[in-house]
Image (cartoon, helix red, strand yellow):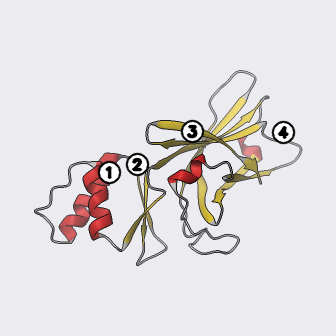
Amino acid sequence: MFYILHNVDAEKVTTLNSEAELVHFMRAIAIENDDEELSITCKEEALSYLKEYCQNLTLLIEGVQILSVELNFDCKVKRKDYDLGSLRLACDDRTFILDVVQSYTPENGDKTIITCDLDVDLETFPVGTGDNESMYNLKAMDFWDSNLLATLFVGMEGDVEEPDSITLFVKIGTTVKAINVIQD
């Protein structure tokens, strides 16, 4: 997954779900820039064009694909009892906020796993330094840093169980990394 911030209109992020979508997007930008003779056929060429010719676009957390966040319960729970909100990542003075956009709760015996898709929501969490803002400047190396703090807002209705664990899954290069998340 690739997140591209439009610097001119700081309220827009284009989310591309695959390398093919990135190549297609950058090809369209090249044509828009009258660079039709330029051949963009792979991820490396697309990223090179982005860095070299597109100062109005910024690739966010380059090299990191956000896969999902999972809430694990050692008992059966109902998904409707939980309000899942934003996932805030922070390392030193760098931050990145993602919002839960969809969740899945497959059958899993006596346990419950809620798996959530995440996306950037600049309308709710704009670029900035306030409580509900983010600089969106986290780097790939931050995901390996022991000081990375990941928190997920989990609202609960009534007398319900808290998650036994919350885990963020990211892909860095070819490695899938599990990151412990704290409930907010």
Rendered residue at 75%/38% (across/down): 165
User: At label 2, which amino acid type do we have?
Assistant: Asn
What residue type is disc 3 on? Lys
Give the spatial CA distance, label 1 vs label 4: 40 Å
Q: Earlier in the sequence, mark 1 or mark 4?
A: 1
Nearest the viewer among 95 and 144 is 144
Q: Earlier in the sequence, mark 2 or mark 4?
A: 2
Mark 3 lies on residue: 177
Q: Amino acid at mark 4?
A: Glu
Q: Residues within 10 Å of mark 3 (few under 14, many from 20)?
A: some
Q: Are marks 1 and 4 in contact (CB under 8 Å)?
A: no
Residue 95, numbered label: none
What residue sits right under mark 4 in the picture? 161
In the image as oriented, which residue stretches furthest toward the bottom? 8
Estimate the spatial distance between the alpha carbons at disc 2 and disc 1, rounded to whole Å: 6 Å
Task: Find residue 78 and report its image quarter.
Answer: top right
